[in-house]
Image (cartoon, rainbow, N blue to C red):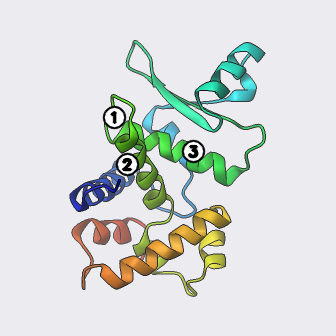
Amino acid sequence: MRLEKEQYEQIKQTVIDTYLEYDVKCIPISAFELAVKMGIKVVAYSSLSKTKKEAAKKISFDGFSVEQEDGTWLIYYNDEGNNYERINRTIMHEIGHYSLGHVKEGTEEEMEANFFAKYALAPPPLVHTLPAITVKAIKKAFNISWQAARYAYRYYQTWLNYGQEEYTDYERKLLQLFKVA
């Protein structure tokens, strides 16, 4: 299953709108910082009781988000056995669910949140500004895992080959926000 082109475009626009609203303007992008700016509480599994920690791991080994009855959001993440890059990506994935207004769980929602995190952590227009565009350079600049850097590099290549000749409005806004336009 793939998302429709319009869905990808809407997700990219949502990422940029989120960055504009919460004044995210430097790389590497910290999902922790963004969550705090958004008023989302971030909770490490290690801070939970043994029983709650085991229950959390049954929901998701990496992390998950919940909306409380009062409307506030919590993101729980596994800080035991996961490195910073994985944790940051997990939190960005959960921010994706929040930003995209997901109210149910399903394959499509997971695909959208995965794309949100991928695009949010290493947007191709920002990759394009690197002095050298290699997997290693992307990993270092965006502080993402090797696997995520390989995906970002491949996505960047696709963006170059199949993207528009000129930047979209949201890409120009992104470049202006990060002061590389």
Q: Residue at label 3?
A: 90
Residue type (three-letter) at the residue carrying disc 1: His
Q: How many marks?
A: 3
Q: Nearer the viewer, residue 1 or 51?
A: 1
Q: On the rendered image, what quadrant is the C terminus found in? A: bottom left
Q: Residues within 10 Å of mark 2 (few under 14, many from 20)?
A: many
Residue under pointer 1: 102
User: x, y percentage for residue 144?
Assistant: 62, 61
Circles 1, 2 touching at the beta carbon (< 8 Å): yes
Tell me the CA gap for discs 1 and 3: 16 Å
At mark 1, the secondary structure is loop
Residue at x 32%, y 59% (from the top left corner): 12
Which mark sits nearer the N-terminus, 1 or 3? 3
| Mark found first going from the N terminus, 1 or 2 | 1
Q: At which x and y percent is residue 75?
A: 54, 31
- In this rendering, the answer to whether 77 lies above or below 55 is below
Rendered residue at 73%/24% (across/down): 47
**Label 3 SS:** helix
Could you classify mark 1 by the number of other residues whose Cα lies within 10 Å: few (under 14), some (14-19), or many (20 or more)? some
Q: Which residue is mark 2?
A: 112
Position of 154 with respect to 116 (left or right) is: right
